[in-house]
Image: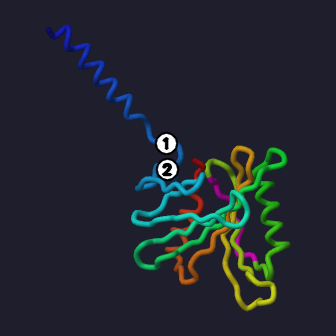
Amino acid sequence: MHKVLLPIIVSVSLLALTSCGKPPDDAIARNCDVERTTVEDLSFCLPDGWSAISQAMGEQSSFVVAVNDNNVHGLVMQLHVKKDLLQEPVTDEVTFAERAVEISRETAPHYKPISTNPVTVDGKETILHIFDASPDEKDPETVVRYYQFVTTHEGYAYGLTAVFMPEADKDLEESLIEVLTSMRFV
């Protein structure tokens, strides 16, 4: 009887141990305490209790994501996602990101740089570009802070530009940057 049960017990034990698997290599996926929130063809790691909804915006394949903390502040971030078909493959993600920073510098009314920091988003190197600009060229007094990066996926360029609520303190700003850079393609 023991000769029959022992191999079965060992097999079931090994099967149970191997099915657990190892944690993902992606640090953000490992540190996401809640299930990732899918929005269109992207997913984000939102803090527990937060929500996100999307709405089509202007051009085909472009949309806006509204992130709400459902608690203290309400709407804490609007994220504009622009998706364009690439004319040719991108061979250097950082050079591609640097060009996007140049375009913002050249085109944003009353542009004022805040920072450009290297970040990894969905396993690809890019630049988180933070800058102030006026949404209206004729009104330099109205200034908005933008958080922007570009990346590519399956033949498309994605430009993500976020605006945080103006009253965001340093802790909320850091949380929102973590949400923004936690973006993954689904």
Highlighted magenta segment, given as a residue range: 113-121
Q: Where residue 185 sits: x, y (%)?
A: 60, 49
Q: Where residue 32 sits: x, y (%)?
A: 45, 54
Q: Nearer the viewer, residue 165 or 30?
A: 165
Q: Tag 1's secondary structure?
A: loop
Distance Cα–Cα, label 2 vs label 1 = 7 Å
Q: Residue at x 30, y 19 (%)?
A: 11
Does the CB distance between marks 2 and 1 fall below 8 Å?
yes
Q: Residue at x 40, y 63 (%)?
A: 48
Q: Relative to 149, say whether 18 is above or below.
A: above
Residue 120 sits inside the magenta stretch: yes
Mark identifier at residue 24: 1
Q: Residue at x 63, y 48 (%)?
A: 123
Q: Tag 2's secondary structure?
A: helix
- Which image quadrant is residue 174 in? bottom right
Say whether disc 2 or disc 1 marks the residue closer to the N-terminus.
Answer: 1
Left/right of residue 51 with respect to residue 183 in the rendered view:
left
Residue at image mark 2: 29
Q: Residues within 10 Å of mark 2 (few under 14, many from 20)?
A: some
Residue 70 sits inside the magenta stretch: no
Q: Amino acid at mark 2?
A: Ala
